[in-house]
Amino acid sequence: MARIVGGLTTSHIPAIGNAIARKMFEDPYWKPFFDGYPPVRDWLDEVKPDVAVVIYNDHGLNFFLDKQPTFAIGAAPEYKNADEGWGIPTIAPFKGDPAFSWHLIDNLVHDDFDLVTCQEMLVDHGFAVPMQLFWPNYADIGIKTVPLVINTVQHPLPSPRRCYNLGKSLGKAIESYPEDLKVVILGTGGLSHQLDGQRAGFINKAFDQMCMEKIVDDPEHFLDMSIRDLVLEAGAQGAEFILWLAMRGALTGKVTTRHSNYHIPISNTASGLLCLENAA
Ligand code: DHB
Ligand code: FE
């Protein structure tokens, strides 16, 4: 049977994609950020997951304001990277696992999560930046992926509780897959940031640090928050924290922190990194 080995969270800021392309790992601005990742890569080298389910938001590449699904999932053999306008060099395509995707779709729809099923899908920085941070050699090792999109762009956004419950249903679906796959789940985006309006540049360190703590041992703390509460505390784009909550909902066992990092700012964002192990 498939097994969930852990959950990873990371910010997915476009500037990171450019910094990776330019190999700015030792640059003083970037070093404290990039230095967070090698311990997570060591853990991944140990655990060797076969598949990554990547929970992220599409930033206008597949879905724009004219058509915006609340939830969408990839069921393609391959996902090509494209740039939705940040000028990031595009990178090699990511492998899919259509049979595993359809198993997840069957189970999630059965649990009343009506996902848009995408047999063709491009992936933007929300997906590609985290994948590159965790697996710089993803194309060589051939790790398979399932992109799972949650709308954080056009209101109304799904509530923290609904995203957490989607994660729970996802976790159950993964663990009922008959193949012996090791699965890791990524929750991308966050932490606090706001890119537009009067509060552009807004960061809330105290709230972020509370999120990084509570999501490990007390994720239900967030379930009565509204999207408005989240936007007030974390900024308009900080609402991406619902993607972390969906990841956390999928961790079915005993969860322990293997590594974490928090760094302000990267571009306009407080960057947060967590490596959570999920023991059976
Ligand atoms: C930035 C952060 C994001 O989450 C995003 O999707 C785009 C830009 C930023 O801080 O620049
Ligand atoms: Fe984003």
Image (spheres, rainbow, N blue to C red):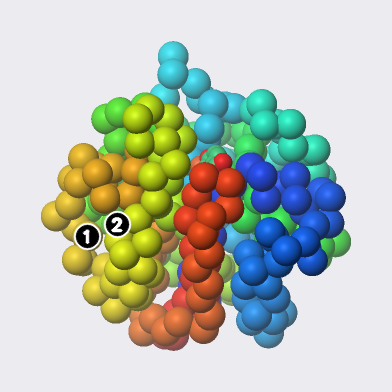
Q: Please say whether residue 69 is visible from this viewpoint.
A: no
Cα separation, mark 1 vs mark 2, equals 9 Å
Residue at horizontal 58 percent and vertical 46 percent from the top = 267
In which quarter of the view is residue 138 placed?
bottom right
Instruction: Judge left or right: residue 20 versus residue 231.
Output: right
Ranked by sequence position, the earlier of labels 1 and 2 is: 2
Give the farthest residue toward the left: 224
- x%, y% of residue 31? 70, 66
Q: Position of residue 61 (x, y in %)?
A: 59, 27
User: Regarding mark 1 in the picture, which secondary structure is present there?
Assistant: helix
- In the current view of this chain or complex, which residue is farthest to the top? 66
Label 2 beta carbon less than 8 Å to ligand 2: no
* Residue under the point 41% across and 24% down: 68
Q: Are marks 1 and 2 in contact (CB under 8 Å)?
A: yes
Name the image quarter holding residue 51: bottom right
The residue that mark 2 highlights is 164
Q: Amino acid at mark 2?
A: Tyr
Q: How crowded is the residue under tag 1: few (<14 C-alpha within 10 Å), some, or many (20+)?
A: some
What label does residue 222 carry, if any?
A: 1
Q: Position of residue 44 (x, y in %)?
A: 66, 76
